[in-house]
Amino acid sequence: MTASICTQSEFGQFLGISVGTGPGKVEENYEAKSMAKWGVFCRLMGANSVPLVDVFVQGSADMVDFHLSMVFKALNCESNYLRIQDDTLRWTISTIDTSMKENLNKPVNVGKELLKKPVTKVNLGTGNLEPSKLETNEQALRRY
């Protein structure tokens, strides 16, 4: 059996578009001294959050973005990868469990506003998202 290896020139033919639809970035800070006293229940259900679930969900999304950014950059196809993510969503907008009429219209408005925002790229040195001064998400999607 022969394995097919994707060459750098072949990889340049791929476009990667990733749209984040999960909850907003968790800004909750936890102090090690107080967490050391937490039992299992507190680790699962914090004061206003679900600490263990937050870590897995947010960490997974961040790692996928980081990994894809590295792969596309390593193959000199950095402009072929676009990640659209809004880390400012509030829980009531990003959750699928809230099906009140007013909440059903919010994702449409959030999407329209997100198109106007600048493209963000992960800084591979710091892991932080940095806004582009060159184009908006809408312009990038049109380019794709």
Image (cartoon, rainbow, N blue to C red):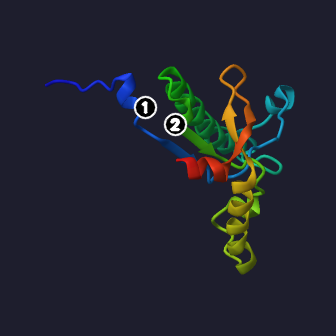
Residue 28 appears left or right of 75: right
Where is residue 114 shown, x and y percent of the image? 71, 55
Where is residue 7 shown, x and y percent of the image? 34, 23
Which quarter of the picture shows residue 112? Answer: bottom right
- Say if 128 sits above or below 54 in the image: above
Task: Return the residue at label 1.
Answer: 12
Give the amino acid type for the residue marked by disc 1 in the picture.
Answer: Gly
- Say if 59 sits above or below 75 in the image: below
Q: Name the foreground residue: 126 vs 13.
A: 13
Q: Name the foreground residue: 140 vs 23.
A: 140
- Say if 37 sits above or below 92 in the image: above
Residue occupying the point 71% across, 50% down? 86
Residue occupying the point 66% across, 47% down? 85
Give the amino acid type for the residue marked by disc 2 in the picture.
Answer: Asn
Residue 72 appears left or right of 36: left
> Residue lying furthest bottom in this view?
101
Tell me which label, 1 or 2, sits earlier in the chain. Answer: 1
Residue 142 appears left or right of 91: left
Cβ atoms under marks 1 and 2 closer than 8 Å? yes
Which quarter of the picture shows residue 89? Answer: bottom right
Where is residue 99 shown, x and y percent of the image? 66, 74
Task: Return the residue at label 2.
Answer: 80
Where is residue 71 shown, x and y percent of the image? 50, 26
The local secondary structure at tag 1 comes to: loop
Crowdedness near tag 1: few (<14), some (14–19) or many (≥20) residues, C-alpha within 10 Å: some
The local secondary structure at tag 2 comes to: helix
